Amino acid sequence: MYGWQGKVLRVDLSKGLIKRENIPETYQSYLGGRGLATKIFSEEVDPSINPLSEENKIVLATGPLTGTGASSGCICSIVTKSPLTNTITCGQAKMYFGAEIKAAGYDLIIIEGKSNSPVMLSIQDENIELLPADYLWGETTLNTENAIRLAISDPWKARETRILSIGPAGERAEPISTIITDGLPVKNGVGIGAIFGIKGLKAIAIRGTRDIDLAYGKGFIEAVSSSIDTLKESETSKEFSDFGTYLLLEPLVKIGALGYENFSRATPETVFSLSAKVFKKEIWKRNRGCFSCPIACLKQTKLGFFPEIDEFISLGPLCDIINPQVTLDAYRICIEYGLDAVEIGATMACAMQLQEYLTFGKTQAFLETIKASGRGEEIAGILNKGALYLARHFKSEDIFLGVKGRSIPPFDPRIIQGIGLQYATSNFGATHLTGFTLIEELKDPSSIKGKAKLVRDYQDRTAILESMGICPYAQFFLPLTIFIEMLNQATGLDFKEEKILKMGEDIYHIERLFNTNAGIKNEDGLPPKMLRQPVNGMISKLDKMLKEYYELRGLGGEE
Amino acid sequence: MYRIKIDHNKCTGCRHCEVACSLNRLATAVNPKRARIRVIQEGDRFFPVISGPFTDASCNIKVDIKFGNHVYDQCDLCRAVCPHKSMLFKEPDDEKPIQCDFCGIDAPGPSCVRWCTSGALTLIEVPSYY
Ligand code: SF4
Ligand code: SF4
Ligand code: SF4
């Protein structure tokens, strides 16, 4: 088999059994990654289960291009049912973890059951073990990574071992917990940490030394080289390498689209002091690239990674914190304890608006509270279930700004119309990550013309890239055709663009059907505030876009 | 005379050079563990190291080098294929040493340089060895 390794690892934590299976026959119809994982998950897991029950599973899936050296081919998708949204969800592990799974000789890892005591899954090519992890339980993710590496007797093997772990928040199965690999949170990982935690799986450590065979090596080299040339020639790609997602910062501030003080006020002048150029000069030490990524959009600081823009705004202006150093400290705490930065930021912003425990702009209390909720002190009981729970707890549901139980990212859907449609129709609750239309929408944020199609296209393209194993950010600079070419050269198969896009659409529908069967119906919406309460005279015109969108998707309106 | 210039200030740790080298060498397979260049992480820095000659014994003196505020073990930055460094620059199955052969300096240049977009690896021409 070319591109794929053809092997699936099935780990039953209840019985302590590990089985090696062949990749399911359907692999060519769903490629791998998010697509294949979604297919397998929806077939094996009853949608109506409680996400925290033993029946829930976790499917970690690389794509046929993960680890092959295809540009930005670093992605390992992680599919499970989320306790935050009760929907199916899919996180993207970046950095080196996915490539290492492939190098160990596997495409997918399926985790099922539940262990009675903490365990860690250790994979060294064919040597697979479930090891006791009591000594890691309670440790932060960074300490966990260090302790696992220290326990490996050969320091060079320890360096090459890649680790995915949960922090204390995940151990307590809190709905806003996430997972961390190489000091970087799994993107879109909110809720997944809890499933690891309830299953007693503290970490996965993996090192592989196997080849990944490619069908046409020469053709593959040419395809990757041509993508590299395209990137080298593109000015925006260079800017994205330099500034990462902060490319959006100034434009978003200018049009007033940043959520400030829980979207309760228009952005004040003070926010203009935040500048990516200043960050670059004063805080960022270097660009960091995930495995085989020529874009390298991540930013290294003295204290680990700098948050991406969504995380930065959530732990910053959304809570009226206009101090990048404080935000960086808060982000660091989130990583250590395994908290999702966007959801905890949104939850604290709600608390601040209600004047419960916290006040907008008070940095000391802000940092102490994040730490307390990471540690699991009393306040965690209220904050770590997410903003919806908090709002209900204080009988002020209108303060919660989210969809399907998940807070909207800090980009205002009243100012940027298409992103609102994306929040409403995402199968994982409000997120921009499965349909990152923001960059393209900067041209005409307030228009709704063609936005339904734009959102649909981004959703399908993202789904398909994540199924191939490619970082979705790559689509801003490289056409899908270039990745299809890499896919064909790597696998020796002949995929056509039309068929590939159809797969993206299929994935969306499988996810949606899973949600419907989980009882999630008529929830494609936006918080009433976004539809009725104008900011700068604008509201979201969701209804019109939604109608057009349903037509495009062939959905007969609401079921 | 061509040389590969490594600027570790620019290295992003993406390891595309490892992939490129292994693909060039194995023709129809990828395996960074079999590459003749490996990217070594030390703290928040990355050092691309290109494999040098094989040695059957490790040095009996250990050396620390200070760059800026950080002290590095020279073994981490050294190019020798040496028993001290376990599997580094050795075939994973039979432990045969792997040595850089400065592949194809004609266009498009050494594979590792070709796929390094950050500018950390560049091919430079110098009159001769000094
Ligand atoms: S674009 Fe950024 S996030 Fe995506 S793979 Fe590259 S470095 Fe990682
Ligand atoms: S390709 Fe360049 S930037 Fe990437 S790891 Fe290698 S030397 Fe560093
Ligand atoms: S010059 Fe060629 S053989 Fe040497 S490290 Fe670079 S790619 Fe590998």
Image (cartoon, rainbow, N blue to C red):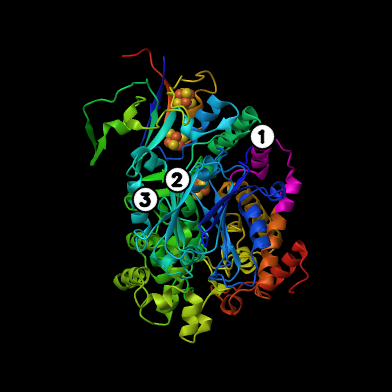
Res. A204 mark? none
Q: Using a 10 Å C-alpha cutoff, classify the residue at mark 3 as few (fewer than 14 neighbours), some (14 to 19) or many (20 or more).
A: many
Label 1 marks a residue whose chain is A
Judge left or right: residue A452 versus residue A240.
right
A147 magenta-colored: no
Q: Residue at x 58, y 65 (%)?
A: A416
Q: Quadrant location of residue A338?
A: bottom left
Residue A147 visible in this rendered orientation of the protein: yes
Q: CA distance from mark 1 to mark 3?
A: 37 Å
What chain is tagged by disc 2?
A
Which label number is shown at residue A242? 2
Mark 1 highlights which residue? A489
- At label 1, the amino acid type is Gln
Measured Cα–Cα span from mark 2 to mark 1: 31 Å
Dominant secondary structure (helix, strand or loop) of the stretch shown in magenta: helix
User: Is-magenta flag for residue A501?
Assistant: yes
Helix, strand or loop status at disc 1: helix
Q: Quadrant of the N terminus of chain A?
A: top right
Dividing the picture into quadrants, the one containing residue A80 is bottom right
Q: Chain of mark 3?
A: A
Q: Residue B11 vs residue A43: left or right?
A: left
Residue, disc 3: A148
Frontmost residue, A431 versus A149: A149
> Of all residues shown, which one is farthest toward the bottom?
A395
Q: Which residues are magenta?
A: A477-503
Is the same chain shared between marks 1 and 3?
A: yes
